[in-house]
Amino acid sequence: MDNGMKGDDRQPDPGWRPATRAVRAGLRRSGFQETSEGLFLTSGYAYDSPQQAADRFTGDDDGYIYSRYANPTVDMFQQRLAALEGAEACFATASGMSAIFATFAATLSAGDHIIASHSIFGSITKVITDHLARFGISHTFVDAADMDAWRTAMREETKLLFLETPANPTLDVFDIAAVADIAHQHGALLVVDNVFATPVLQKPLKLGADVVVYSATKHIDGQGRVLGGAVLGRRDFIDEVIQPFMRHTGASLSPFNAWVLLKGLETLPLRVRAMSDAAQRIAEWLQQRLGTEAVRYPGLKSHPRHALAMRQMAAGGSLIAFELPGGREAAFRFLQALELIDISNNLGDAKSLITHPASTTHSALSEEERARQGIGEGLLRISIGLEDVADLQDDLKRGLAAAGIA
C-alpha cells in the first residue's frame, strides 16, 4: 500500500533470521525518521482531491481510506508477524476469537461442513456448535490423534478442518502434516491455531497448513496489556477472502493495540525461549512430585506424543498441565495457597499465571465433553513466565502442601 510516508519502507530481507525479523520486518519511518514505529491514532484520512478520494474507493489508488480497512501502524504489525511466521500475508483483528470467527465466516457458507478436534478452546467449540450451526453449517468433532477419524468424518461438503496443537488445556500434540494431507486430498482447508507454540516454536504453514490463527493477546503481547488477533496464509486468501469480510464486519485491530503488539514482537523470541526453558525445568520438577502420568508437557519424554512434538516444535513451550488427586477441592486449595503465581485465565504473559480450566476457560462445555477432552476436576494449567525458576518452585511447593502433597 502507498501510505504516503517518507523515509524507510523496509520489507524483510530474505537473509534475515527470525530474531532480526521480529525487530525489523515491516518497519516504516516517516520523514521524522523516528526509531520507534509511528503510532497513527487516526480513524480517517484526507485526500488531495475528490478524484483521489474516488480512486481510493475504486482501488485505482491504493492509499488509506479508513482505519477499519487499513492503518499504517496495523500494516507494520501485519507485515512483521507475516515475516516471522513465514506467511505471504496477514490480517490483524481485534482479538483471537475474532480472527477465528472471521476465518470460519469468510470461508464457510450454509450447507458446508467443518471438522474440528475435540481438544480446542471452549469458546471455539461454542462458536462451532451454536453460532455456525444457526447459519446451516454442520460440524463433526474428532479425536485429532486418530487419522482414520479425520478421514471417516470427511464429506463432499467439508470445506474446512480446524486443529489446535498443542491443545488447550491438555497440551495434547497432533500431526499437522498428516491432517493437512487429509484436508488437501478432499480439497478442504486446514486451519491451525498456533497460539500455544507461537511462530517462534512451530511453523504450521511449512508443515502443510493453509491458514494460521493467533490470539496476539497471549505471547505476542506478552505483558497482559491489549487484545489482538491475526489470520495468516496465502496472499490471495487474505486479500480475497479475509479482507473483504473484515472490511465490512468491523472487528479490526486498533492502531494503539497494533503498536503495543509491535513492541511485543521485538522480544517474542527471547521471551518464548526463556519461558520454554523454565517450563521444561518446572515440568520435570513437578513430575518428580506428582508422578509421570499426572504432568502433561510436550517437552517431557513421558508425553505420549513427545517425538512428534519435537519434530514439529523447537521446544516444549511455556504451558504445563498437571492433574491433582482430590479433584476440584484439592485444585482450589492449591490455587488459594499460591503467593507469587497469579490465578488468571490468560497465558503467555511475563508473569506466571495459573487457571482451573473446568471452572473457567472450559466451564461452558458439558461434563461429558470435558471428560472427552481429558479436562478433569483436578486439572490445572500453568503458563510459565519470566520469574526465577526457584521462586516459582517455592510457590508451587506451597500449593502442593495445601493440596496434601508433600
Image (cartoon, grey):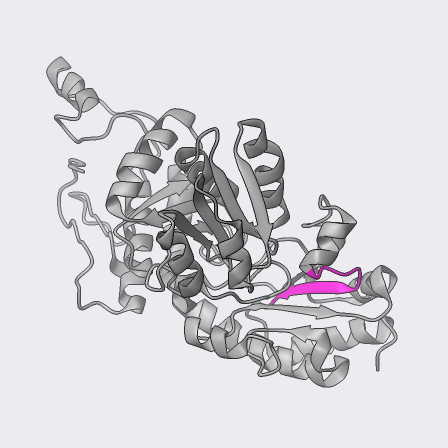
Picture coordinates of residue 346, whole percent (x, y): 61, 54
Q: As rendered, which of 371 and 76 lies closer to the eye?
A: 371
Answer with the quarter of the image where residue 145 lies. Answer: bottom right
Q: Dividing the image into 4 quarters, which one contains the C terminus?
A: bottom right
Q: Is residue 68 visible?
A: no
Answer with the quarter of the image where residue 384 lies. Answer: bottom right
Q: Is residue 125 left or right of residue 374?
A: left
Q: As rendered, which of 367 and 268 lies closer to the eye?
A: 367
Answer with the quarter of the image where residue 314 lies. Answer: bottom left
Q: State yes or no: residue 379 in magenta.
A: yes
Q: Give the range drawn in magenta.
A: 374-383
Residue farthest bottom in this picture: 288
Q: In this view, does 172 lie to the left or right of 72?
A: right
Picture coordinates of residue 99, whole percent (x, y): 45, 42
Picture coordinates of residue 241, whole percent (x, y): 32, 36
Image point (74%, 64%), residue name: 379
Q: Taking 405 as reference, is 102 above or below it? A: above
Q: As rendered, which of 229 and 145 lies closer to the eye?
A: 145
Image point (40%, 66%), residue name: 200
Picture coordinates of residue 128, whole percent (x, y): 57, 39
Q: State yes or no: residue 65 in magenta.
A: no
